[in-house]
Amino acid sequence: MTRIKKTRTSGPLGTRHRPAEEARQDRTRAPETKKKGAGLKSGSRHSPSAEDKQQHSGKGSKDPRHGSKKPIALVVTEAEQKLMAQPKQFKPVVQLSKAKEPEMPPEQELALLENDEKLLELLDQVDKGEILTGKDAKYFNAKTARHAELVALLGLDQDDEEEDLDPLAKLERTDWRKEFLGE
């Protein structure tokens, strides 16, 4: 950029302030036009229009409110008083009972108990010598008791099965001293 030297004389810094009268004379007036209506006239929602009057003239005036037009009695009738005078029954109509598990044949229940993973894990812990506590002990006791009931019910004795498998087991269990010594 080239350098411009400053001069002592300067031009007008801005436009001159004109008095209000001069400014009014120079202004041009906008052409006067009719205002456009922006919407309905005030109060049109509450005052019925001429079209509505023509449509409903035969039927009568329709209430613009929605809902039931049935009158409500503000005084209690005799029938209602009789109903209120009767003692209320607070006894339950339906009896509640615990839901029962569907009964299955003992063979299926025994098969389910023998294949129960949680029970098998607890049996392993007991075999290792660990002591069961809390819910595990209750679960283990309940399932083993039920298993014993089912075995007795079905006539399956585990001792008989073991004897059939090992003939020497019977010899080990008998006390020979009683027979030889006569005790």
Image (cartoon, rainbow, N blue to C red):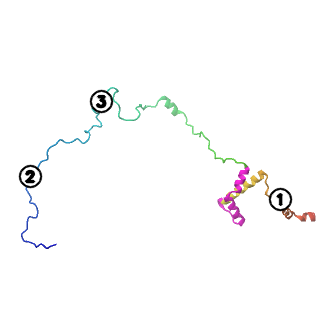
Distance from the alpha carbon under mark 1 to that under mark 3: 107 Å
Distance from the alpha carbon under mark 2 to that under mark 3: 54 Å
| Badge 3 density bin: few <14, some 14–19, many ≥20, Cα 10 Å | few
Snapshot quadrant of residue 67: top left
The numbered mark, 1 or 2, whose residue comes first in the sequence reads 2
In front of the other: 88 or 146: 146
Q: Picture coordinates of residue 103 (x, y %)?
A: 69, 47
Q: Which residue is mark 3?
A: 53
In front of the other: 183 or 141: 141
Q: Can residue 183 be seen by looking at this rendering?
A: no
Q: Can residue 33 be seen by looking at this rendering?
A: yes
Q: Picture coordinates of residue 63 (x, y %)?
A: 35, 32
Q: Which residue is mark 1?
A: 164
Query: Label 2's element?
Result: helix
**Residue 111 in magenta?**
yes
Which disc is residue 127 wearing? none
Q: Is residue 39 left or right of residue 146?
A: left
Distance from the alpha carbon under mark 1 to that under mark 2: 131 Å
In front of the other: 163 or 147: 163
The numbered mark, 2 or 3, whose residue comes first in the sequence reads 2
In this view, the residue farthest toward the front is: 1
Snapshot quadrant of residue 165: bottom right
Mark 1–mark 3 CB contact (< 8 Å)? no
Q: Which residue is mark 2?
A: 26
Quarter of the picture containing the N terminus is bottom left
The numbered mark, 1 or 3, whose residue comes first in the sequence reads 3
Q: Amino acid at mark 1?
A: Asp
Residue numbers of the magenta segment: 106-135
Point 79% across, 57% down: residue:
158
Residue 154 to residue 120: above or below? above
